[in-house]
């Protein structure tokens, strides 16, 4: 009890210090003495106005958010029996965020409590889907993979609403990363009873959660109604998350980091293993994380600049570090890493290969032709033929000249991402690996946007080079961090997801600090769009495809051997590390040039190789060209659909692909789960 009291008192004292510092930070010149004078009732009118108008509401919001997210994260980890569970990894934040943005997009202005109820429904639906697809939670990192797939879909839908209803959702982009900029105490005051009741109810359930942690069978033997307990805990934790999102948007990874940090104190305070102590201490640690991130942000950037930066950016970066630490600390899945599944027997069918090749060749002709014809203005096939012959008028020539770079960018970027996915899946022997989920595309996007921000007039080759540096740096970190006495496939993808989250947070940070009102710039890069592309920007991707695809195809036997196991290539005399390095470098360059052409796009490198294997078997001599064709067609069709369905408005191709790719990703997860069981 003494240790518990000392640790709790220490955390409370730290919160008090951070709160005091927090109150002194701001654009107005209000120092420590001014704040102390105001606290004891001797402050001047200006100081009181500053404190009451912005600083106290911001502080109280931070306190409430920290408690809500910290307790919610601890409860979710207990329900799922997984230290990786949190409002972020279970997509609860994303579901609640989508609900709030949908309300604003359709012109509805709801009071705080109804808006919170809508966020609750969205978050609850997301958590039910994730827990259902992952089997109700387990110690496997695959819970995070399912949650990340659902989160990407929900974020894609959210970005789509932000683009389609730009006027109605003004200001919600930065808010979507979690912002403590609150104008008054209204939302905080109305959400405080919700948080208090939910926390109290979870504390009452503390003993039941202790028993639930023993496992469903043991808990049932001890008389616990497992399903009722789990449902009740899920409802309460989602309510806490929805309250936090209603106030400040989805502040990332606080619910993951707070319980993890709290459990690290268990050796010093054994009582923290019990939920009636774990839950409130996690809430206090959550307050420390939120306040600490906000204080650090304003101390480093200055109060004026930090106003534009969402606090959630800082907590997401911290949470990515915690997620990487958890992935490295966790044990291997214990199962051999298997090659991405492909129906190898099909490889002997020449007829099927010929039919597939003919169909893909036809699609490679039809997809760009349709892409040139459709858009905000429909072009007839005869007009298209005349354009190729140089016999069209000025207006039609202008339209088609603008569309051609977009169509070519979609084709070559899709092919590049698909070929990169083939190489990465083979070397890592992970059917879930692809440039997006391994952080490569986020790293490439970060490199490209950094250069564009610093040098707005940078040329296509410079942007491609910066994207390449970012991609290589991101993948080097992911691969190096995932290596621990071998390369565990689940660990690789979880660390990749952490790097992807950190990369996207840094992209948001760059954009809101350098060009905060240019939301279109952010969404274009973060959702993958061919808008405004020129032929010059397509050239680096074309060159990378022409040079590196034959290189990888020439090593198709090495790719086959890599996909088997770690020992067979060595027994056959292959220099494994050198071969792996060449393949990964080629894949990274392909992904980087694709990002420089169309921005950050996920799932193409996952879907195209899997479809190719289902059509022509598992041998990479056939998989590589088929996957390249499928990737080109997929992105081309997605781009055409995005430019046509709501013309003259446009949906970025990356959003269309994410909406299609997520179900496929979940299907792959389900199949590989069956293989392992």
Image: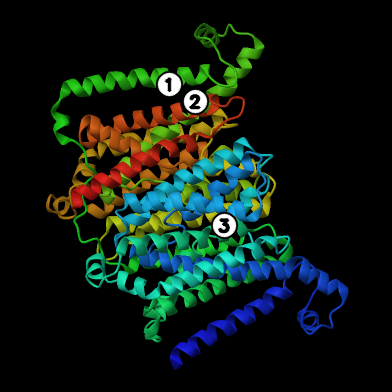
Spatial CA span between label 1 and label 3: 41 Å
- Of the numbered discs 1 and 3, the one sitting upstream in the chain is 3
Tell me which colouring the rendered structure shows.
rainbow
Q: Is residue 473 visible?
A: no
| Residue 62 image offset from top left, x and y in percent | 62, 68
Q: In the rendered view, would you say 650 is above or below 229?
A: above
How packed mark 3 is, by other alpha carbons closer than 10 Å (few <14, some 14-19, many 20 or more), is: many
- Of the numbered discs 2 and 1, the one sitting upstream in the chain is 1
Q: In the rendered view, would you say 560 is above or below 351?
A: below
- Nearest to the eye among marks 3 and 2: give it: 3
How packed mark 2 is, by other alpha carbons closer than 10 Å (few <14, some 14-19, many 20 or more), is: many
| Residue 458 image offset from top left, x and y in percent | 62, 42
Residue tagged 3 = 245
**Residue 367 - label:** 1
Mark 2: secondary structure: helix
| Residue 587 image offset from top left, x and y in percent | 37, 44
Please state which of residues 502 and 391 is positioned toward the viewer in this rendering: 502
Residue tagged 2 = 640
Q: Find residue 137 and report its image quarter.
A: bottom left
Please name the residue shown 43% across and 61% down the image.
86
Please name the residue shown 56% across and 9% down the image.
390
Q: Find residue 85 and report its image quarter.
A: bottom left
Classify the position of the N terminus by image quarter.
Answer: bottom left
| Residue located farthest toward the right when viewing the structure as drawn | 45
Q: Is residue 105 visible?
A: yes
- Of the numbered discs 3 and 2, the one sitting upstream in the chain is 3
Please name the residue shown 65% across and 41% down the image.
457
Mark 1: secondary structure: helix
């Amino acid at each position: 009890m003494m240790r518990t009291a000392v640790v709790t008192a220490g955390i409370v004292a730290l919160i008090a210090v951070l709160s005091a510092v927090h109150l002194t930070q701001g654009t107005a010149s209000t120092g420590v003495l001014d704040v102390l004078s105001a606290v004891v009732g001797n402050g001047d009118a200006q100081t009181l106005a500053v404190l009451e108008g912005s600083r106290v509401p911001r502080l109280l919001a931070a306190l409430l958010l920290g408690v809500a997210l910290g307790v919610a994260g601890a409860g979710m980890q207990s329900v799922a029996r997984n230290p990786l569970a949190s409002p972020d990894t279970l997509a609860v934040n994303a579901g609640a965020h989508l609900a709030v943005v949908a309300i604003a997009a359709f012109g509805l202005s709801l009071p705080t409590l109804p808006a919170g109820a809508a966020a609750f429904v969205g978050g609850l639906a997301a958590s039910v889907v994730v827990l259902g697809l992952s089997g109700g939670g387990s110690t496997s990192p695959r819970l995070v993979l399912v949650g990340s797939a659902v989160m990407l879909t929900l974020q894609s839908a959210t970005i789509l609403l932000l683009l389609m209803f730009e006027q109605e959702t003004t200001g919600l982009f930065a808010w979507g990363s979690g912002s403590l900029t609150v104008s008054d105490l209204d939302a905080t005051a109305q959400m405080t009873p919700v948080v208090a009741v939910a926390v109290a109810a979870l504390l009452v359930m503390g003993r039941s959660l202790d028993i639930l942690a023993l496992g469903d069978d043991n808990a049932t033997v001890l008389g616990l109604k497992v399903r009722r307990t789990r449902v009740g805990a899920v409802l309460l934790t989602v309510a806490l998350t929805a309250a936090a999102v209603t106030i400040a948007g989805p502040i990332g990874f606080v619910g993951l980091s707070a319980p993890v940090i709290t459990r690290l104190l268990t050796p010093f305070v054994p009582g923290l293993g019990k939920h009636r102590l774990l839950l409130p201490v996690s809430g206090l640690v959550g307050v420390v994380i939120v306040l600490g991130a906000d204080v650090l942000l304003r101390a480093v950037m200055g109060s004026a600049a930090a106003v534009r930066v969402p606090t959630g950016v800082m907590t997401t970066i911290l949470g990515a570090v915690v997620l990487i630490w958890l992935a490295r600390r966790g044990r291997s899945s214990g199962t051999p890493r298997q090659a991405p599944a492909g129906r190898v027997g099909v490889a002997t069918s020449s007829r099927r290969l010929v039919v597939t090749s003919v169909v893909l060749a036809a699609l490679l002709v039809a997809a760009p032709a349709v892409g040139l014809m459709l858009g905000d203005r429909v072009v007839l096939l005869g007009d298209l033929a005349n354009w190729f012959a140089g016999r069209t008028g000025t207006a039609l020539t202008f339209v088609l000249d603008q569309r051609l770079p977009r169509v070519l960018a979609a084709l070559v970027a899709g092919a590049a991402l698909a070929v990169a996915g083939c190489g990465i899946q083979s070397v890592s022997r992970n059917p879930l690996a692809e440039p997006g989920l391994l952080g490569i595309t986020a790293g490439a996007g970060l490199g490209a946007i950094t250069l564009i921000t610093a040098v707005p007039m940078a040329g296509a080759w410079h942007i491609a080079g910066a994207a390449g540096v970012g991609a290589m740096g991101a993948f080097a970190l992911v691969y190096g961090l995932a290596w621990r006495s071998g390369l565990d496939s689940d660990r690789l993808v979880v660390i990749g997801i952490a790097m992807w989250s950190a990369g996207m947070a840094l992209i948001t940070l760059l954009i809101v600090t350098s060009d905060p009102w240019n939301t279109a710039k952010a969404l274009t890069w973060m959702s993958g769009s061919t808008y405004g592309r020129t032929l010059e920007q397509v050239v680096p991707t074309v060159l990378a495809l022409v040079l590196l695809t034959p290189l990888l195809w020439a090593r198709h036997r090495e790719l086959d051997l890599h996909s088997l196991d770690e020992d067979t290539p060595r027994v056959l005399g292959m220099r494994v590390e050198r071969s792996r390095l060449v393949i990964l470098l080629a894949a990274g360059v392909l992904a980087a040039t694709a990002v420089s052409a169309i921005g950050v796009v996920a799932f193409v490198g996952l879907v195209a190789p899997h479809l190719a294997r289902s059509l022509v078997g598992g041998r990479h001599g056939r998989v590589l060209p088929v996957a390249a064709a499928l990737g080109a067609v997929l992105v081309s069709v997605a781009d055409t659909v995005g430019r046509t369905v709501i013309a003259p408005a446009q949906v970025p191709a990356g959003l269309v692909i994410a909406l299609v790719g997520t179900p496929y990703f979940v299907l792959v997860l389900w199949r590989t789960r069956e293989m392992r069981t």
